[in-house]
Image (spheres, grey):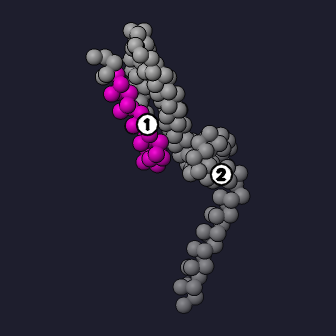
Amino acid sequence: MKSKILIPSVAFFILFAMGAYFLINPSYEKSLKAKYYFETGDYKEALVLAKEAFSMDVYNRMASTVMAQSITSLKYVTYNNDAKKYMYSINEIAKHDVISDADKAKIRTICNIMIDSYIKLAPSVITDSDLVDDAAKYYDSFEKLLEKVTR
């Protein structure tokens, strides 16, 4: 009868010890903070903390994962910011009554750059779906624009 009572106590102690280790170990503490910042969308801060945690303990898989995912998410954030900026620039060109050949070439160049940049992006399962969806919408817009300008 004592062995049945002892097993849950040992399991609880092991879980408690593991939890305490994760909370006390500075590497895991930083990786938990990095995970929090990643989940809240602050990918830059998540990357900084994950790199610090990883430099303390190269076997910290959470830090490694958060670091890789933050880099991927930051690529999407950069793509979306660039796309927004370029779309604004293209809309300013489109306001002119006549679009010159130089402006058409500029639009073609921008579209080709953004299409090539999108193809290099590779989302993972945990990449924010809003980031991925926004990037896909911009990609479609650039493809359609390129098609119109190339005619």
Residue 129 lies within the magenta run: yes
Q: Position of residue 17 (x, y in %)?
A: 66, 66
Residue at 59%, 42% in the rendered image:
43
Q: Which residue does the numbered mark 2 point to in the structure image?
A: 33
Q: Foreground residue, 58 or 133? A: 133
Q: Vertical placement of 66 versus 82: above or below?
A: below
Mark 1: few, some, or many residues within 10 Å (few <14, many ≥20)?
A: many
Q: Residue lying furthest top in this view?
A: 101
Q: Which residue does the numbered mark 1 point to in the structure image?
A: 135
Circle 1: residue type:
Ala
Magenta-colored segment: predominant secondary structure: helix
Q: Foreground residue, 126 or 118? A: 118
Quadrant placement of the C terminus: top left
Quadrant placement of the N terminus: bottom right
Task: Report whether 127 appears left or right of 46.
Answer: left
Q: Earlier in the sequence, mark 1 or mark 2?
A: 2
Viewer-side label of 1, 2 = 1
Q: Is residue 106 visible?
A: yes
Q: Position of residue 19 (x, y in %)?
A: 64, 64
**How much space separates mark 1 and mark 2, taking CA atoms?**
27 Å
**Mark 2: which secondary structure?**
helix
Residue at 41%, 16% in the rendered image:
97
Span colored in magenta? 123-146
Circle 2: residue type:
Lys
Residue 150 lies within the magenta run: no
Q: Position of residue 141 (x, y in %)?
A: 37, 31
